[in-house]
Each structure stands twice: as structure tokens, then as C-alpha cells.
């Protein structure tokens, strides 16, 4: 359930993400609707707590992908990035998986619509999720922007989160994937979580 997902998210976050600003970012998440928001209006994770659950699924999938096919060494090096000189690679996996969809904070609103009850013939008010984007700043790039307000990202992490929507991102996607395999892996993890872990009929 929602509480269990939140507890799991918090424990992974605290265990793996320790760089400067991470505690402040987590406080922001707890103040926001991150733990109660859906992951979409009607496609996957369209229920309370769906966003947190989806983020956990992407973290699990990304971890599996990297274990199955390790990234080239240069994609895991931090010596070119003075921001995180001692970053542990699992921290990168946790950041990319758990935080890639921060752009969906404050993004959904609950509305009601009238739906006819087939049994009684009566009209009833049914809640549904609608989009109300208070910060129209794109998708992946908005997540990067929101994270960077609290905590610095490596170039590889920022690119991976920026391009996690794959071909839905923009025409630079294939170049991003070529230069940074982490970006390709995060996109694949996102797709696997969406289509394999969160099928509609499971809910």
C-alpha cells in the first residue's frame, strides 16, 4: 500500500543518497504531494501513491539492468565531476530511479465527473485525476531543475533524467544515449516499470 511504498522509498533514499543537499531535498518531497500523487491520469499508476510506487519500480529495474550489463567504466567515473568526487555508483542508480519523475509533483489535481451507475440508473460523482501543471517546464528537464535546487547532479545523472522519456524527449535522444549509456538504461527501466510492473489490470 501507499504507506509501505513510502517507507520503502524513504529507507532506500536514506541508505543510498547522501550527497550535500539530499536531506533538504527529502524534506521538500515530504512537504509536497510526491507520496500521494498518481504516476499518470489513466495509463499506469493512476491511483494515490502511484508516483512513489513507480519511482521504486524504476529503481529496481535500473539496478537489474546495470547488474545484467555493467556500464562502461567511464560512465561510472566521477573524477571528471568535482561535485561528487566520492559518489558511489549505487547512489547514482538511486538518484536516477527514485527521482526521475519529480516533475510530477504538483502536476495532478483531483476533479469529479458525473458517471451513470448502470445498476441504479442514477448519476454519481466520481473522482478522477486531471493535469494542472503549475510549472510548465517540460518533463525530464523539469525533474533535473527541481533536484538541482537542492542537490547537485553529475552530468551523467542529469542527462539520464533529462532523456528518460526516450524518443518522447527530443531529437537529441539518440546522441544522449550514445554518449551516456546510463540515459539509455534509465529509459529502459522506466519502460519496463510502466509496461511490465504496473499493468492496469493489476489494480
Image (cartoon, rainbow, N blue to C red):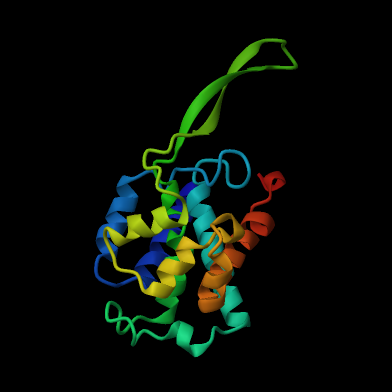
State whether residue 132 is above or below residue 136: above
Residue found at the very far front of the displayed protein: 171
The picture quadrant where one finds residue 186 is bottom right
The picture quadrant where one finds residue 92 is bottom left
Counting from the top left corner in percent of width and height, residue 21 is at: 25, 65
Q: Residue at the spot x=34%, y=45% of the render?
A: 32
Horizontal side of 135 relative to 160 (left or right) equals left
Judging depth in this view, the residue of 159 and 29 nearest the camera is 159
Horizontal side of 145 relative to 111 (left or right) equals left
Judging depth in this view, the residue of 196 and 181 nearest the camera is 181
State whether residue 112 is above or below residue 156: above
Counting from the top left corner in percent of width and height, residue 113 is at: 57, 20
State whether residue 73 is above or below residue 87: below
Residue found at the very far right of the displayed protein: 119
Q: Residue at the spot x=61%, y=15% of the render?
A: 124
The picture quadrant where one finds residue 144 is bottom left
Q: Residue at the spot x=55%, y=30% of the render?
A: 128
Locate the C terminus by quadrant. Answer: top right
The answer to whether residue 1 of the structure is visible from this angle is no
The answer to whether residue 44 of the structure is visible from this angle is yes
Judging depth in this view, the residue of 10 and 199 nearest the camera is 199
Horizontal side of 87 relative to 45 (left or right) equals left
Counting from the top left corner in percent of width and height, residue 46 is at: 57, 41
Counting from the top left corner in percent of width and height, residue 129 is at: 53, 33
Number of numbered labels in the structure image: 0
Q: Residue at the spot x=44%, y=77% of the render?
A: 90
Amino acid at each position: 500500500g501507499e504507506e509501505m511504498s513510502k517507507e520503502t522509498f524513504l529507507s532506500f533514499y536514506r541508505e543510498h543518497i547522501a550527497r550535500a543537499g539530499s536531506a533538504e531535498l527529502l524534506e521538500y518531497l515530504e512537504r509536497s504531494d510526491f507520496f500521494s500523487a498518481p504516476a499518470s491520469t489513466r495509463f499506469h499508476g493512476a491511483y494515490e501513491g502511484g508516483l512513489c510506487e513507480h519511482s521504486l519500480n524504476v529503481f529496481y529495474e535500473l539496478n537489474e539492468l546495470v547488474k545484467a550489463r555493467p556500464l562502461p567504466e567511464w560512465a561510472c567515473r566521477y573524477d571528471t565531476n568535482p561535485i561528487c568526487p566520492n559518489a558511489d555508483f549505487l547512489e547514482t542508480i538511486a538518484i536516477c530511479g527514485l527521482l526521475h519523475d519529480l516533475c510530477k509533483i504538483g502536476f495532478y489535481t483531483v476533479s469529479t465527473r458525473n458517471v451513470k451507475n448502470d445498476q441504479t440508473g442514477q448519476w454519481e460523482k466520481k473522482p478522477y485525476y486531471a493535469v494542472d501543471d503549475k510549472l510548465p517546464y517540460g518533463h525530464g528537464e523539469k525533474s533535473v531543475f527541481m533536484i538541482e535546487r537542492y542537490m547537485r547532479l553529475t552530468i551523467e545523472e542529469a542527462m539520464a533524467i533529462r532523456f528518460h522519456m526516450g524518443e518522447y524527449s527530443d531529437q537529441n535522444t539518440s546522441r544522449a544515449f550514445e554518449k551516456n549509456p546510463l540515459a539509455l538504461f534509465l529509459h529502459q527501466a522506466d519502460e519496463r516499470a510502466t509496461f511490465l510492473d504496473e499493468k492496469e489490470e493489476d489494480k
